[in-house]
Image: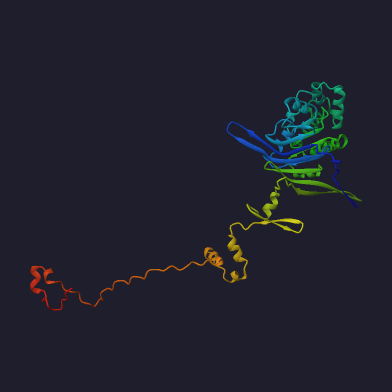
Amino acid sequence: MSAAQAPDRTNGARPYIVCDNLVKIYKTEDLEVVALQGLDLEVQRGEMMAIIGNSGSGKSSLLNVLGGLDRPTAGQCRVGDLDILQASESDLVDYKRHHVGFVWQQSSRNLVPYLTAFENVRLPMLFGNMRKASDRAKSLLRAVGLEDRMHHRLSQLSGGQQQRVAIAISLANDPDLLLADEPTGEVDTQTAGQIYDILRYLNRERGLTIIIVSHDRNIARQVDRVVAIRDGRTSTETVRRVSIHEDGDDHTHDEFVIVDDTGRLQVPQEMLDQLSIRGRAVVDIEGDRIVIRPGTSGISTVAASRAATPEADAAEPPADQSVIPARVELAQTVVPARRRPAPVPPKPSRPAHEPSRPKRPQDVPDEHRPFAPPAGGDARDD
């Protein structure tokens, strides 16, 4: 048994497509949408790869930039020798006319409904003044398996056949790069398999560089490499490996995270969810590995240190007790005693059995004076 990876098309040459810190911002009167946020990507010439991601992740925006339909806001985007950001309008027109082909999900964006399949494929070649346009149109329709349907109108073709006509149209200008935006989004599984077979044939026989945008993560079985985009940045990369056995080929896939020039990476969301990592995480080096663990969110450093000491285990405070006393105890803070004034003793109250002092004679009303005790009796002068 031997193992082989996906074919290496680099040959030591520089990448055919380079996106470096690519930014794309769409602006309206009162709104700005950041579609690409510093995306990095390299594609080798002759590679067949896919870009996947959720809606709004930036897949279609990237495809529009690579196809010269939109200019990036910042960063670098180079296809071959063309700098998309700095290119003139005439250079972009020449690029779109001769070097790149498009396949869209909706057949209405690819086809003229009142023309036959043959006429649809020949039409862009007539605009480009290509020689032997009719012969080339027939050759392309044979390449996509529609030799017997080339003179049928679109209403006489199935959805899968219409999409194959669209692929033939995208090859009319003999491009170096084919961009396909959800090419199998509106067909059944069997027809989708046929379309992928055609794309692989074109990639293998013509050396065509193909980039497919899709929501389907199972597309990894159809291409050599899959790059996942999340929040406008490249997140992960999946590379297909082919192990050759005696009873046939066995395809396996290796998934990698992308580390940019500043050391940033995006950990797959399902891994973060599995370990409940939110906000902060602990990163350690263990031998030749970098290990990411959930952070101690919501626990103070002092309280965590206290929990790690054997003495603290025997004196664990109850759940409703504040951690502040523990923090003070660990820190062993000494507060100097301050001299307090001596307490003032309270004024003693008269015992309950003590008779009340009679009023003075001068305090007794005239009508009660005959009944008042004499001045020298039990009455006590102040």
Residue 357 versus residue 263: which sits nearer the camera? 263
Total number of numbered discs in the rendering: 0
| Residue 190 in picture, x, y percent from top left | 80, 39
Colour pattern of the rendering: rainbow
Residue reaching furthest right? Answer: 246
Q: Quadrant of residue 197?
A: top right
Residue placed at 72% from the left, 57% from the top?
285
Residue placed at 59% from the left, 60% from the top?
301
Residue placed at 85% from the left, 41% from the top?
12
Is residue 11 rendered to the left or right of residue 19?
A: right
In the depicted structure, whether residue 285 falls above or below residue 253: below
Residue 334 in sight here: yes
Residue 107 versus residue 262: which sits nearer the camera? 262
Residue 174 versus residue 11: which sits nearer the camera? 11
Is residue 279 rendered to the left or right of residue 250?
A: left
Image quadrant where one finds the C terminus = bottom left
Residue 371 versus residue 182: which sits nearer the camera? 371
| Residue 37 in picture, x, y percent from top left | 67, 40
Q: Quadrant of residue 307?
A: bottom right
| Residue 257 in picture, x, y percent from top left | 74, 48
| Residue 132 in picture, x, y percent from top left | 87, 22
In the depicted structure, whether residue 146 falls above or below residue 378: above
Residue 321 in sight here: no
In the depicted structure, whether residue 85 falls above or below residue 346: above
In the depicted structure, whether residue 222 falls above or below residue 151: below
Is residue 99 rendered to the left or right of residue 365?
A: right
